[in-house]
Image (tube, rainbow, N blue to C red):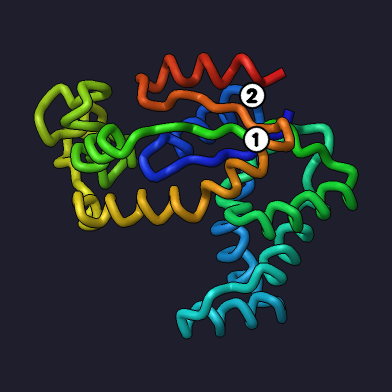
Amino acid sequence: MNILFIAPPAAGKGTFSDLIKNKYGYTHISTGDLLREEVKSGSELGKTLSDKMSKGELISDELIKEILEKKLETINKNKPFIMDGYPRTIEQAKAYEEILEKLNLDLGKVIYLKIDKETGLKRVLGRLTCPKCKKGYNKLTGYNMPKVEWVCDECNVELESRKDDTEEAYNVRYDTYMRETQPLIDYFKNKGNLIEIDSTKDADSTMKEIEQWLV
């Protein structure tokens, strides 16, 4: 079953995408990665994207649709995939469904990882990462705390926090995401594709709930 994740900041989308990919062999498709790969390829489309990105211009829905369709044409149709970072609007959702229909691919389930702002803020403010192995920790949530404060369990090096992991920045990101994404949530709910999962629990419990739908 293919998966489309909808998740506010700090809901764990990246964590669960990696867990599902590694455990079940899903293909992980990120629109952000696709854009960077196209630029790196040096294609005419990549040059167009590079020019727009260097100027800080928004990438149009038409270009994103073109890149995504190009990617979906090449994937192993016998392997399920995770769609990450797209769609974000109803217009993009309809464009995505057009691609799937054209390529005879199934939408699968849309999994909405619900998280309240307070829980998300605690995760963000407590988030620590090892600069060497990239393992993540959290000093506030009580889950995956380092054995030694500010030190990676594996590499024994000092952990780092992101400069943009501030209360003000998170509140803006969360409010913006929820305001812009609510119509998309309602869209898939009305179509009967939406699965709501409480992502405020620990990662193991949330993963078990997600796994119930991986059939």
User: Against 169, is 23 above or below?
Assistant: above
Q: Position of residue 153 (x, y in %)?
A: 22, 27
Q: Residues within 10 Å of mark 1 (few under 14, many from 20)?
A: some
Q: Secondary structure at mark 2?
A: helix
Identify which residue is drawn at 33% across, 40% down. 133
Crowding at label 2, few (<14), some or many (≥20) Cα neighbours within 10 Å?
few
Q: Nearer the viewer, residue 89 or 133?
A: 89
Q: Give the residue number, with chain letter if any, for mark 1.
A: 189
Q: Quadrant of residue 122?
A: top left
Quadrant including the C terminus: top right
The residue located at (28%, 51%) in the rendering is: 170
Residue 151 locus on image (x, y percent): 14, 34
| Label ID, residue 120 | none
- Residues under numbered marks 2 and 1 in contact, where contact means CB atoms less than 8 Å apart: no
Q: Which amino acid lies under the numbered mark 2 shown in the image of this protein?
A: Tyr
Instruction: Give whichever of discs 2 and 1 has the lower sequence position.
Output: 2
Q: Which residue is mark 2?
A: 24
* Residue 104 against residue 63 in the figure, above or below: above
